[in-house]
Image (cartoon, grey):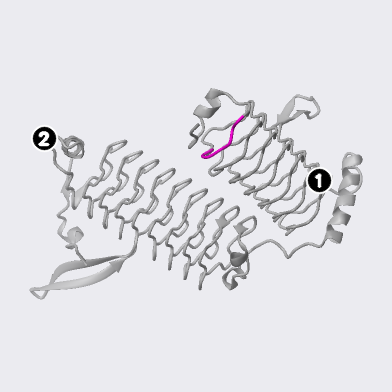
Amino acid sequence: MTEQPDRQSKNTWIRLSQNELERVLQLHGRFLAGQNNGRRALLKFHDLNGLDIRQRDLRQADLTGCLLKQAWLTKANLSMAILFGADLRVANLLGANLSRADLRGACLRGADLTDANMVNADMRQASLMRYGTKDGMTTVTTEKTSAELSAVVAHRADLSGALMSGIMLLNADLTDAVLRGADLKHADMRNSVLTGALLEGVDLSDADLSGSTLTGAVLRDVKLTNAKFDGADLRGAILDTSARSADSIRTAISTQPPVKPEQVKAVLDAHALWVASSSHEGARAELSDLDLSGLSLHAANLAASVMERSALRIADLSEAALAMALMSYADLSGANLAKADLRGVNLLRASLIEANLAGADLGPVDRVGSDQQHRYPANLEGAKLIRASLPGAVLRGARLTMPDSSDPDLRNADLRGADLRQANLKGAQLEGANLTDAQLDAVRGYTA
């Protein structure tokens, strides 16, 4: 139980000016460095609304009940800080470090948490004891307050291991966020965007994700007991066998039942005619939102086909013609794409986890259009290439800005001109790969 007086009614928050805060931060810096005359920042129930705290070090600071509305906390270090019951509405926390911070009962409604580090942060429900008076008598009331992150923008935020049971996450944008092992029991996540989010090992028991968008999200080893997915969009989501068979997702929008090989053959025949006749005959292959998992499409002609959000798990697409194909959010986990022609393909946020792309051509398509001046590079932005095999693959000019591509095999790959900004190549095998030092400097997480 944590005691917290009813500060708002008594108006007892202590307002600090920017200069006064600077003095506190200087002393706190000395405290962290173990220097003489240092003093830990004890800012319980202080009013810091709108102040500039960008890139400042507030590790272990006590900000219990602090007012930080619209405060500038960009890249601030708040690791292990106490923000119990703090008001962080519409605060700018872009790139901030909130790892292991105590955010129980805090309000972050509308805050910008883009690229924030919130690993193992505690955002559980808080028990508050409030004191007041009634008829001349002191009264004590106890209330439970959940942390609130409604309407936050948390693109690429790392919430691994975060304690978020009972949290309010209504209308939040968690695009490409990492939530490995997070506790989201009883969380209210209605109408939130979790596009491309990594939800491995997450506990979603009794959570409400109705109306949420999970296109391209990874749900593996998740607990879904009594979870609600009414109207949630799971097309293109990567689900393991357990998640796919869970009763709780039956009311979600998902890919259609598995397609039979004979059904696909008719589509391929019409598409081949469409390609050969320069689109004058036949019909372009439209295979979006279908479950094509396990099908043999070896050497199939699917150039310029549309397979967005399709499930192609462990499908055989070796030596297939897939140039200029639209495959955004497709689930190609474990698929065989060896020696496939993937020039100019769009694999935006597709899952290529443990896929085989040995010798595949993911280079650009040149001299496109009536003036023969356009170039279309392969787009793998946001694609998941975890443990993918790409030895000898051609990736010239490819867009490889990826949130999670750890442990890929890129030996002898041609990466000339590839855009690797913010790519995560932790554990990558790059022996013999053709890339520059400048490209490696742009990579996130790679160590030689």
The crowd level at tag 2 (other Cα within 10 Å; few <14, some 14-19, many 20+) is few
Query: Residue 410 location in percent, x, y?
Result: 63, 36
Is 397 situated above or below 111?
above
Is the Cβ of the residue at disc 2 closer than 8 Å to that at disc 1?
A: no
Which region of the structure is painted magenta? Answer: 425-431
Which type of secondary structure does the marked residue at label 2 adopt? loop
| Residue located 16% across and 72% down the image | 140
Mark 2 or mark 1, which has the lower sequence index? 2
Query: Residue 161 location in percent, x, y?
Result: 41, 56
Query: Residue 45 location in percent, x, y?
Result: 19, 53
Where is residue 409, by image quadrant? Answer: top right
Is 70 situated above or below 103?
above
Disc number lying in front (2 or 1)? 2
Q: Is residue 324 left or right of residue 352?
A: right
Q: Amino acid at mark 2?
A: Asn
Which type of secondary structure does the marked residue at label 1 adopt? loop
Q: Amino acid at mark 1?
A: Leu
Q: Is residue 334 left or right of residue 447?
A: right
Q: Is residue 44 left or right of residue 417?
A: left
- Is 152 magenta? The answer is no
303 vs 279, nearest the viewer: 303
| Position of the N terminus by quadrant | bottom left
Whole-number angstrom distance, CA of label 2 to CA of label 1: 70 Å
- Is 427 magenta? The answer is yes
Q: Which residue is mark 2?
A: 36
325 vs 335, nearest the viewer: 335
41 vs 313, nearest the viewer: 313
Q: Which residue is mark 1?
A: 302
27 vs 416, nearest the viewer: 416
Query: Residue 96 location in percent, x, y?
Result: 36, 42
Where is residue 249, by image quadrant? Answer: bottom right
